[in-house]
Amino acid sequence: ELVKHDQYWEKDEQGRQLPFLDGITYPIIVEGSTGVAAFRAGRVDVTGRQSTHHLTPEQKFILERAMGDKAKFIDTMYLGWDIFFNNLNEPMTDVRVRKAISLWFDRYEAVCIIDECDGYPTAVWAPGSPYGNADFITWPGYNKDTKEADRAEAKKLLTEAGFPDGFKMKIMAGENWVRYAEWAQDDLKGLIDPNNEGNISIDVVDNATYGDKRCAGDFETLNPLSSGVVPRHSPELLSGGYLSTNKCSYIQHDDKKVDDMFAAIAASTDMKERYQIAQDLEKYLTLETALAWNIYLEFRQVAFRDYVKGFIPPTWTPSTNADYATTWLDPKLR
């Protein structure tokens, strides 16, 4: 339960003291479907804004049909999903292996299988960010029109690296995110397990073990639990996930050029220079070294009762970046 601070600093454009609400109560509802039912019944004003509690397309359709204009919806970018690896262990030390895997991934298929097509492939930076390359969707591994050629090149690279029949890979999965690991296991079979020898396995661990093993570097490949490496708008927010000095990073590597490029962005006060370095860094991580296996960005829907007014949808991650200072409830509609 949150209560309004009587000395809050902000006022709106009309000079009225904020926040308007006296407080906010967040009921703890474990099951996402139960939360949707509570919203439909009028017991809560807003649906959930966390990983397993956002609306599915089907739930949104049901609410639209059942509630009409009594419910309104916002779409926001939520999280980007990546596959991570320990570049300090073979065979990931070979750039050809890393490039082959990145080329092989079908990022468009991932969006539809895991998230009902409710997302978009992404590189290092958030879509639309001036730090990113606007043409990344045409790059090898991202261009859906060249997928057949990309996969042929992936097999060629893996053969050149000495793995024509693939190799053993264990994907460590956080207990809440197994479906991502299952998609990666299935998607990579044609490259890493072409002879159906069971090369790719999944190790499901609890969240505490996941964090301990990650910080100890005790993993080969892993799917995200909650990651500082997901696409963002800010280099300062993103850097910690990629720095070689971060022992708890989801990507373990020793490439000091990555550190230097992030440091150069942080040191620059010229925005055009910052953008250029960031775009070069995105190419370096994605194309030159394949240290980043970014897959896609989720879009998420949140439903509000029609009497909830003044909420400003954040451009990024509504579960943590929502500001309710200007939100109010219209008594005429309640």
Image (tube, rainbow, N blue to C red):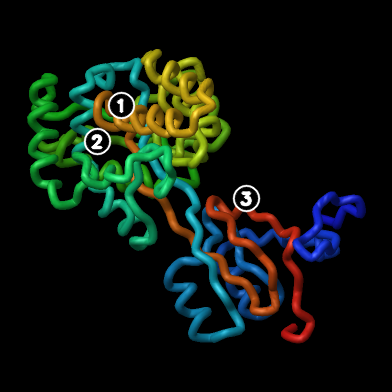
Residue at which label 2 appears: 102
Nearer the viewer's eye, disc 2 or disc 3?
3
Q: State the image coordinates of residue 100 (x, y, percent, origin top left).
A: 18, 31
Above or below, 210 relative to 147? above
The part of the image, by quadrant, that contains residue 6 is bottom right
Q: Are marks 2 and 3 in contact (CB under 8 Å)?
A: no
Residue at image coords 44%, 18%: 259
Cα gap from disc 2 to disc 1, whole angstroms: 13 Å
Is the residue 151 above or below the residue 319 in the image?
Answer: above
Considering only order in the chain, which callout, 1 or 3, is on the residue closer to the N terminus? 1
Which quadrant does the N terminus fall into? bottom right
- Quick check: 103 left or right of 56? left
State whether residue 131 is above or below residue 317: above
Quadrant housing residue 72:
bottom right
Q: Quadrant of the C terminus?
A: bottom right
Q: What's the residue at 54%, 33% (across, down)?
A: 237
Closer mark to the observer between disc 2 and disc 1: 1
The residue at which mark 3 appears reads as 321
Examine the rendering and report whether any part of residue 240 can be seen: no
Secondary structure of residue under mark 2 = helix
Binning the other alpha carbons within 10 Å of mark 2 as few (below 14), some (14 to 19) or many (20 upward) gives many
What whole-number distance in Å separates the C-alpha atoms at marks 3 and 1?
Answer: 29 Å
Residue 292 or 16: which is nearer the viewer? 16
Q: Which residue is mark 1?
A: 284
Q: Tell me the residue at 85%/56% (across/down).
A: 3
Q: Amino acid at mark 2?
A: Ser
- What amino acid type should be assigned to the residue bearing mark 3? Asn
Hey, which quadrant is residue 274 in on the image? top left
Location of residue 317 in the rendering, given as x and y in whole percent from the top left corner: 55, 51
Q: Is residue 214 above or below residue 294?
A: above
